[in-house]
Image: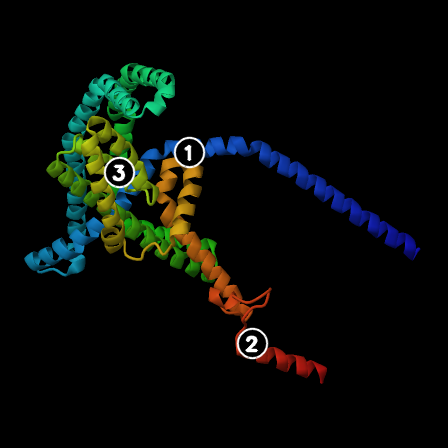
Amino acid sequence: MKIMKDEYKRYRYWGVTIFLALAAVVLLNIVLGSAGFILKVLSTIVSALSSVWIGMIIAYLLSPVVRLMEEKLFIPLFCKMTKKDKKGVAGLARGISVTLSILLTLALIVGLLVLVIPQVVNSVVNLAKQAPGYGETIKGWFDKLLADNPSLSGMQGFLNEALDKLKHWLQNDLLQSANLLGTVTSGLMSAVGIVVDFFIGLIISIYLLASKEKFLLQAKKILAAIFSKKNYKRIMAAAKETHHVFGEFISGKLIDSLVVGIAMFILMWIIGIPYAVLISVVLAVANLIPFFGQFIGIIPTALLVFVEDPVKGLIYVVVVVVYMQFDANVVSPKILGDSIGLGSFWILFSIILFGGLFGVWGMLIAVPVFAMIYRWCTRFTNRHLKKKGLPVEAFAYNSPGEDVTVPEEVVDAGKDEKNGGEQ
């Protein structure tokens, strides 16, 4: 009877196991089958809330400006004028600070558009008009090269065919692409949807900036209700550190890119490099992308200047390379400080990874995001090594084979435990 009962328990165990395994397979299949639908729904939600994301980004970027105006200018001024304490003038100071920050932002955007767009459009139009002559210029270079080097005469047919195709591309495809680019750019800039999203985002940013402390307290309240006290403290510490890293990196990169754009425009204006405004804008925007940004900006602009004037092209390459080295080693470290905390390899790795996953936007946020991931992984590893009594320094593991350099007190404790067990 007991044997039959054991057999029944064993069969029941295997039956439940098989049922749970099949249920897990079915559930996994349902989840994977619904993944596309779920992603589509999430994408639709993200797209519908585009103005909210714009507002949050604007509010995050303007928050330091508002705080600076409020604490350093208007609160002291109003306290002195009205003889009230800080709380009595805080609302008025916040309102004026937010208003001035939004107005200054709009003035800066409009000023840049008025100054930059006409010159960029003129540069593109002139480049398109002069495109047919670039083919003749390049053909002249190759003819001179063949005349000076008779041994290359066998390549005449190949070079002529290649130059004909290049000339056709310059005369037709490039000109049409330039016109198309101008049309698309003009259409995008005047699109009602983009303008509406931006202004709605601007309004949302005003609400966020005016009551940022209230929204932060509400978020903390929700997190405290969901998580335990220990995890809540960890989340708050991680959020504070993330804010510090992102704030330092974004503000530093924006300032550094502005410095690059202004400095390169001044240098090119002094030297007489063509398309100075267009090239300065390209270099400033490309500089927002760490590591690859310099190459993304330098290569196409160098080709542009070189085709226009080879001598000035060489001068431009020397000047821009020297300045970018100066910026990377002197200016950028002074502005960014040690907010990143990543080595060159990990910066390159993060840009490749996030760029492959999310495109240009991924490359822009790759470094600060990966910097936080790197810090969290390092702390997780160190915490567990300390629990095991192992050293956290990497050089301690430079031992032959699989041996690890363990602190002496850990070795002694292990010996005592072993001796005690033998006794």
Q: Which residue is farthest bottom?
A: 423
The residue that disc 2 covers is 410
Q: In the rendered view, would you say 152 is above or below 291?
A: above
Q: Mark 3: few, some, or many residues within 10 Å (few <14, many ≥20)? A: some
How far apart are the alpha carbons under marks 3 and 1? 29 Å
Labels 2, 1: front one: 2
Q: In the rendered view, would you say 210 is above or below 375?
A: above
Q: In the image, is 164 to the left or to the right of 223?
A: left
Q: Mark 2: few, some, or many residues within 10 Å (few <14, many ≥20)? A: few
Report the front residue among 203 and 40. 40
Residue 203: in sight, yes or no? Answer: no
Q: Which residue is farthest right?
A: 1
The residue that disc 3 covers is 285
Quarter-of-image position of residue 235: bottom left
Q: In the rendered structure, which amino acid carries the disc numbered 2? A: Val
Q: In the image, is 422 to the left or to the right of 1?
A: left
Give residue 45's mark. 1
Q: In the image, is 114 to the left or to the right of 182?
A: left
